[in-house]
Image (cartoon, rainbow, N blue to C red):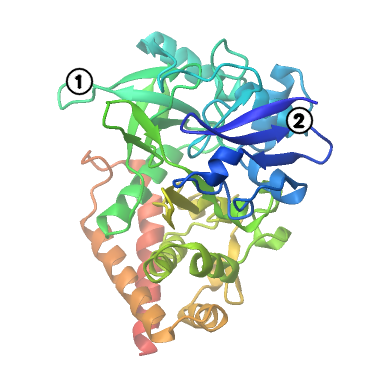
Amino acid sequence: MKRLLVCLNGVRVGLLSDDENPLFAYDPDWVASGPGHPLSRQLPLQAEAFSGKEVRAFFSGLLPEADSRDRIASILGVSGGNDFAILERIGGDCAGAVSLFPEGTPLPESRVGGLRWLDDSSLASIVERLPRQPLMAGEAGVRLSLAGAQTKLPVVMEGASATSKARIALPLDGTPSTHILKPEPERFPGLVANEAWCMELAREIGLSAAECQRRVIGRTPCLLVKRYDRMPAADGAIERLHQEDFCQALGFSASRKYQQEGGPSLKDCISLIREWSSVPVIDIRDFLDAVIFAALTGNADAHSKNFSLLYRGKERRLAPLYDQVCTLAWPELSKHLSMKIGSAATLAEVSPEHFQQLATAARLSWPMVRERLQDMADRIVGACRGSNGSDNSPVDASLELPRGIVSERAERMLKLAQRGT
């Protein structure tokens, strides 16, 4: 039976076994160590091995989804349903602090296995290849994995200044990445500008959100997102911070990330924070702000894999926002909410009444929820009136539609909320 070493920041924490019913067992030294913490809420520290659903939900949640996963499997010559085989080949740098290595492979002696610096031509070539070769799977030394269906690539970026653009490298042999490169899909023109603006709007109104910047690579608009699960260590190397998304923490597979497909609800997410966060009062408030922000910005795709918990030692906190997009800017995309707000199933339905229903169901104070709803709508209206696009650049014509949608939704919600006070 094949097995993979499961490591956090290069420290062995357990073994994952290749079996029809996957098995995971913690290393006894990790269980006994003072700083040891679980990989997942579904995999608490214990001497006994885990098997089945809990193991599959966490480890499959590290892998890409949909067409990206199928293409990677085809490139690697393995079955698209074989989580273990795919992780064996691309699990060197995953979300959070997780790295996986075939048993018997010497662990890297340092946190820097190698970098392949890319000139403009090489970078443009990689961006062009990514739709056909997701995550550069099969490339020598490249073992990178990220969840999600969108084309993306973990990279190392450094050296940006006011007078020069940052250098970008491919991380090799388990080197931690620092940023996520997200090329714009041809079928969604304006997506990069839309996401960059939504993320900047979130930060402008006081929400914690990942930093990002726009860059044209070759002829492709791209978004470079700074990883919040990476931080510089005292020795100058990059240290990984462990995280798990809400699907993983609640024991759902990525195929059930939408509530209408049997996935988590907002009530489930709030209960998770209440039970698992180190500071639930603050994290519930911030999660509620994120839900309100998604509703006001016309984002129907705020599903349970787009929210995560970040581990720092034994502290567990809500991670910064990421993947914020005004999906209403594309009429062909679904208007159905990934997670219902009260009884509201679509963006068009959402009103203060539905947030009151959510407050009742999730045991939240309705006056507090109403206050945050009004405050968020008011801040978004103000920001939209003064917004001139992202990155302090001139007004981008591609932003006119999302900014108009967001402004209109926030103004409507503000009026409705004020009328009910």
Name the disc covering residue 200, or none: none
Find residue 147 and report its horizontal and vertical position in percent: 58, 39
Which residue is labeled 1 in the image? Answer: 164
Say what amino acid the circle numbered 1 marks. Ser
C-alpha distance separating marks 1 and 2:
42 Å
Nearer-the-camera pick, 131 or 157: 157
Count numbered badges in the picture. Answer: 2
Seen in the image, is 329 located left or right of residue 266?
left
Q: Nearer the viewer, mark 1 or mark 2?
A: 2
Tell me if residue 192 comes above or below residue 216 in the rendering. below
Seen in the image, is 174 located left or right of residue 346?
left
For the residue carrying disc 1, how many other residues have a C-alpha within 10 Å: few (<14), some (14-19), or many (20+)?
few
Say what amino acid the circle numbered 2 marks. Gly
Tell me which residue sits at (22%, 39%) in the image.
394
Find residue 12 and report its horizontal and vertical position in percent: 55, 32
Which is nearer the N-term, disc 1 or disc 2? 2
Which residue is labeled 2 in the image? Answer: 80
Find residue 104 and report its horizontal and vertical position in percent: 65, 18
